[in-house]
Image: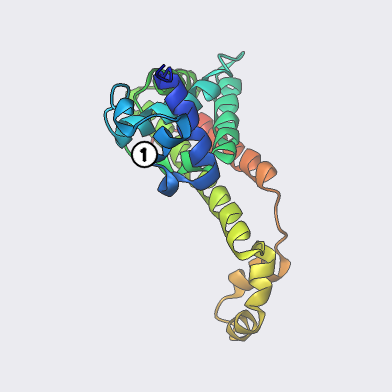
Amino acid sequence: MPVPLSREKIAATAIRLADAHGLDGLSLRKIAKELGVGPMRLYDYVGNKSELLDLMVDVVYARIAEVGQRDGWRATVLAIAHATREAALDHEWFSDLLGGRPHLGPHALAVGEATAAGLSAAPGVRDIDDLQRAVGALNAFIIGAVRREVTERRTTRSTGTDEAAFQASLGPYLTRMLKTGRYPTVARLVIDGAHLNAEETFKHNLTTVLDGITSQSRT
C-alpha cells in the first residue's frame, strides 16, 4: 500500500531535515528517502525546490502568526518581532530566507498584514510613504539582527569558540593595531565593551527603532 502523503507531511519532514542539516543538505530526494517513497511521488505535491521552500517558510510564519492581535499597535509589532526572532533561532535556515524573494503564503501575508496594520496606527506614521518607510526600517532591523545572531551561533559551533574567545585569539594583532592610536573608538569597544546578552540587545534596539518610527517628523 502506498505511503500516504500530503503537503503538510512533506513540509514537516523538510523542516526536520533543514533543522538538522541546513538548506544545503536539503533535497527532494532526501525528503523522499526519509518518507520512504520514490522522489517522483513528491512532484504530485510540490513542483520544485523553490515551491518546497515557500511551503516550509509559510509553516514557520504560521507559528509567528499565532501571536495574534494585541492591545495596541506597539504590543502587536513587538510580539511579531520577538516571535520572528524565536522562530529563526529554532529554525536557523529560516534566517537565510528572510529578505530574499517575497514570502506570499497565507500565513506570511497574515504576518505582513498584522505588522503593516500595526505600524499604520503608530503616531509617526501619517501616510502611505511613512508606512512604507516604517515597514522597511522594521524589517531591515529584524532581518539584520536575526541573521547576525544566527551567524554568531553557527560560528561558535563550527569553531568551538564564542565571540569573546575569537577576539582573544586575535589579541596580539589587535593590541598592535589599537596601540597605533588610529582607532580610539574601536579600542573602547574592544577593551571596555561587555559581551551583551543577545535577547536583551534585540529588545533594546527594537524599542529604539519603534521609538524612532513613533517620533519621526516631516522635514
Up-down relation of residue 43 to residue 180 (above or below): above
Up-down relation of residue 43 to residue 168 (above or below): above
x then y, percent, for residue 111: 46, 22
From the image, tell me which residue sits under label 1. Answer: 29
Q: In which quarter of the image is the C terminus?
A: top left
Crowd class of label 1 (few under 14; some 14 to 19; many from 20; radius 10 Å): some
x then y, percent, for residue 72: 59, 16
What residue sits 33% from the left and 27% below the top?
Answer: 42
Residue 116 can be seen in this image: no
Q: How many circles with numbers are drawn on the protein?
A: 1
Q: Is residue 203 left or right of residue 151?
A: right
Residue 2 location, quadrant: top left
Q: Is residue 122 left or right of residue 48?
A: right
x then y, percent, for residue 131: 39, 26
**Which one is nearer the viewer's eye here, 182 or 23?**
23
Query: At label 1, which amino acid type do we have?
Result: Arg
Residue 158 can be seen in this image: yes
Residue 40 location, quadrant: top left
What residue sits 59% from the left and 70% below the top?
Answer: 186
**Which one is nearer the viewer's eye here, 110 or 105?**
105
What residue sits 58% from the left and 23% below the top?
Answer: 74
Q: Quadrant of the N terminus?
A: top left
Q: In this view, does 206 lie to the left or right of 61?
A: right
Residue 26 location, quadrant: top left
Up-down relation of residue 49 to residue 157 (above or below): above
Q: Is mark 1 on a helix, strand or loop?
A: helix
Up-down relation of residue 137 to residue 183 (above or below): above
What residue sits 61% from the left and 22% below the top?
Answer: 75
